[in-house]
Amino acid sequence: MIQKGNIGVTETVMPAQPAELRAGLVAQLRGLGAVRSEAVERAVLAVPRHSPESAILRELALSESSLSAQQLAELLDDSVRPSVPKLREYLRAHDRTLVFQVRRGGFALGAFYKLRTSTEETQG
């Protein structure tokens, strides 16, 4: 959109809508060969990009260490932040499925694993 003012001409950039962003993501994933079916495409298009669950999992994935519910709540945006008790309840309900409690009250994404080194493979 171009607006004319007293000082000069300015251009206002309109932010993309969530549906447009998801469609762009699907196009990129198709180009990479990651989306091969209509069912997967529909699923990607249907998932809200900024849901509390996606924000929680994103923060856990980006963290280098385990996080408590309180630490996690402080990292989440206000628009998707559940209360600490609700967040704690969610984490405990998904322990050993989506998240893994590595210390009392400290959660990480999934279970930890260690890749075998080449020397361990030849010995074991």
Image: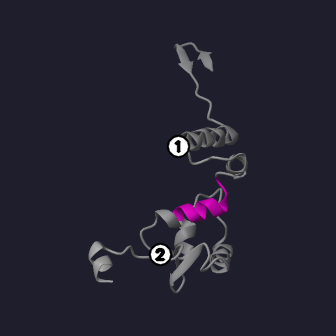
Residue type at mark 1 is Leu
| Residue on which disc 1 sits | 32
The residue segment tinted magenta is 50-59
Left or right of 52: which side holds 76? left
Q: Are marks 2 and 1 in contact (CB under 8 Å)?
A: no
| Residue on which disc 2 sits | 66
Residue type at mark 2 is Ser
**Magenta stretch: residue 106 in it?**
no
Q: Residue at x 56, y 21 (%)?
A: 11
Element at badge 2?
loop
Which percent across, then down, holds residue 43?
71, 52
Element at badge 1?
helix
Who is closer to the viewer here, 60 or 9? 60
**What is the magenta segment's predominant secondary structure?**
helix
Who is closer to the viewer here, 40 or 2? 40
* Residue neighbourhood size for the residue with mark 1, other residues' Cα within 10 Å, grouped as few (<14), some (14–19), many (≥20): few
**Magenta stretch: residue 58 in it?**
yes
How far is mark 2 from mark 1, CA to CA? Answer: 32 Å
